[in-house]
Amino acid sequence: MWQLFVKEVNTYLNSLIAYIVIAVFLTGIGLLMWVFPDTSILQYGYADMYTLFSLSPYVFMFLIPAITMRSFAEEKKGGTMELLLTQPITDLQLVLGKLFANWLIVVFAILPTLVYYYSVYQLGSPEGNLDSAGIAGSYVGLVLLGGVFTSIGVLASALTENQVIAFILAVFFCFFFFSGFSSIASIDIWGGASYFIAQLGILHHYEAMSRGLIDSRNLVYFVSVMMLMILLTQLVLGSRKW
């Protein structure tokens, strides 16, 4: 698995995909945080990073599928999938190797935003008047969200050999799992069950972590969704034996 992980990371770093994704993410978030009047921190009058953590999920919904769409779809399209499956590696190791490589690229995209934290820290009055512990918790939530979206994207890529279809499927699944359950729960027909339905979605747990609250229930939720996506991807790969 380690060799596959290294190969995947090197493939990304030797292509333009990783750099384009990171540049687009940082530029988009930077414009939203500092330039556009409706979301600019400079218009708030107080220092925080709400814009970063509230808008990043919606940017991730498009950027992460763009990263993951080639994971298995390209292997199938290029005819190298059969060769890959003959290697001494289990389906689970194959899925994890792809997943962790893609997730690492997402983390690479998040790391430069620490410059935004430093800038906001300097802008505080007095300097450093910032909830750093809460922001650290929010970063944990953002990294975990990136992992969940990555696992969804890898599953979508395993379902088809067409990268465009993999991208569209991943965007739809990410959107549905993130805010779909909350939207359904807001329909006024569920009564007391609406809170339970909202808890099934990512948004409910991400909002809790975005407030800097690292609760074991939220951590278990993110890990559970990732494990579910990994098992489904493994099941899709294993379907060739049926």
Image: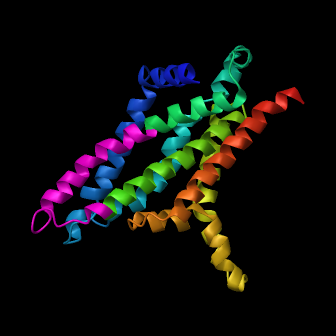
Q: Nearer the viewer, residue 153 or 141?
A: 141
Considering the whole magenta stretch, tell me its main secondary structure.
helix
Q: Which residue is drawn at the image coordinates 66% and 35% (left, top)?
A: 157
- Residue drawn at x 66%, y 22% as measured from the top left: 75
> Does the magenta run of residues contain 125?
yes
Magenta segment range? 106-133
Furthest-right residue in this view: 242
Whether 26 is drawn above or below 196: the answer is: above
Relative to residue 109, is residue 72 depicted above or below? above
- Residue 238, position in %: x, y? 80, 31
- Taking the image as shown, residue 64 lies to the left or right of residue 174, namely left
Task: Work out which quarter of the rendered image holds the N terminus and state it.
Answer: top right
User: Which residue lies at the image location 67% right of the left edge and 45% below the top edge?
Assistant: 229
Is residue 49 visible in this depiction of the protein? no
Vertical relation: 100 (above or below) 86: below
The colour scheme used to paint the residues is rainbow
**Coordinates of residue 55 in the picture (x, y in percent):** 41, 59
Tell me the residue at 90%/30% (across/down).
242
Give how far across and how far down residue 6 sits, in percent: 49, 22
